[in-house]
């Protein structure tokens, strides 16, 4: 039996080794900050600084509804010239909440980030968010990943020139939090501007073949 040669960074063999061996659970930040949807922006910003994190999970009745990142603060407050104290989380959070599972490979996670034009993904296990993985976390795994991500960026450069609409990413991302019942689903679909799970779609009268 001939041993498979070790791959050099950036080669197909090396890429397969990374994809097989490194999961998001191994590189994610296990510090998860959750705050209520009615919390004002200054309080959210203080928590992000206090815990040195770049995102906060927003909840309503203890159910995850979305995420607020540093970019959301800039886009929702600074560029809109709003007064932070007069705005709460519900006004600027990003939805739907795209998630990955702990065993998801860092390669797959990076592809999702690129397609959705986001930098962070909550990691969900048995309905509970156990961490957040960022593009920086992934890049720190090994220098070889920077080559992989560069290739992915080059392949998606045209799409990345503008932020994709919800409709454009609908087919690529079916896993996340239902915007009606707030439960995690692996079968989200866009209905009247909201991502709904199968049960909620049926409850609202969506017909199926």
Image (tube, rainbow, N blue to C red):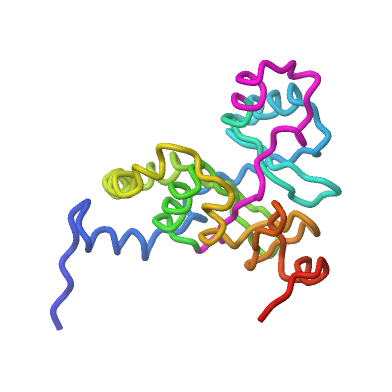
Image location of residue 105, percent across then percent down? 44, 60
Image location of residue 87, percent across then percent down? 78, 25
* Front position in the image: 184 or 203: 203
Verify whether residue 80 appears in magenta.
yes
Q: Give the residue at x 66% y 46%.
A: 95
Q: Magenta stretch?
A: 74-103
Image location of residue 184, percent across then percent down? 70, 61
Q: Give the residue at x 18% y 72%.
A: 4
- Quarter of the image for the N terminus: give it: bottom left
The image quadrant of residue 21 is bottom left
Verify whether residue 11 appears in magenta.
no
- Quarter of the image for the C terminus: give it: bottom right
* Front position in the image: 55 or 175: 175
Image location of residue 81, percent across then percent down? 67, 16
Q: Main secondary structure of the magenta part?
A: loop
Farthest bottom residue? 1
The image quadrant of residue 199 is bottom right
Farthest right residue? 61
Q: Is residue 150 toward the left or the right of residue 204 in the image?
A: left
Q: Is residue 97 toward the left or the right of residue 38 in the image?
A: left
């Amino acid at each position: 039996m001939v041993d498979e040669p070790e791959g050099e960074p950036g080669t197909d063999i090396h890429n397969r080794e990374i994809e097989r061996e490194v999961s998001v659970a191994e590189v994610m930040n296990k510090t998860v900050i959750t705050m209520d949807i009615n919390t004002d922006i200054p309080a959210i910003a203080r928590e992000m600084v206090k815990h040195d994190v770049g995102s906060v999970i927003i909840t309503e009745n203890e159910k995850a509804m979305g995420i607020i990142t540093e970019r959301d603060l800039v886009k929702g407050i600074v560029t809109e010239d709003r007064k932070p104290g007069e705005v709460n989380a519900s006004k600027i959070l990003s939805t739907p909440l795209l998630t990955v599972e702990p065993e998801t490979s860092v390669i797959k996670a990076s592809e999702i980030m690129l397609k959705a034009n986001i930098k962070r993904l909550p990691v969900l296990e048995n309905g509970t968010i156990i961490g957040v993985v960022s593009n920086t976390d992934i890049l720190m795994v090994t220098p070889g990943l920077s080559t992989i991500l560069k290739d992915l960026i080059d392949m998606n450069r045209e799409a990345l020139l503008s932020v994709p609409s919800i409709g454009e990413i609908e087919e690529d991302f079916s896993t996340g939090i239902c915007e009606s019942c707030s439960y995690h689903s692996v079968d989200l679909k866009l209905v009247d501007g909201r991502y709904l799970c199968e049960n909620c779609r049926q409850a609202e009268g969506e017909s199926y073949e």
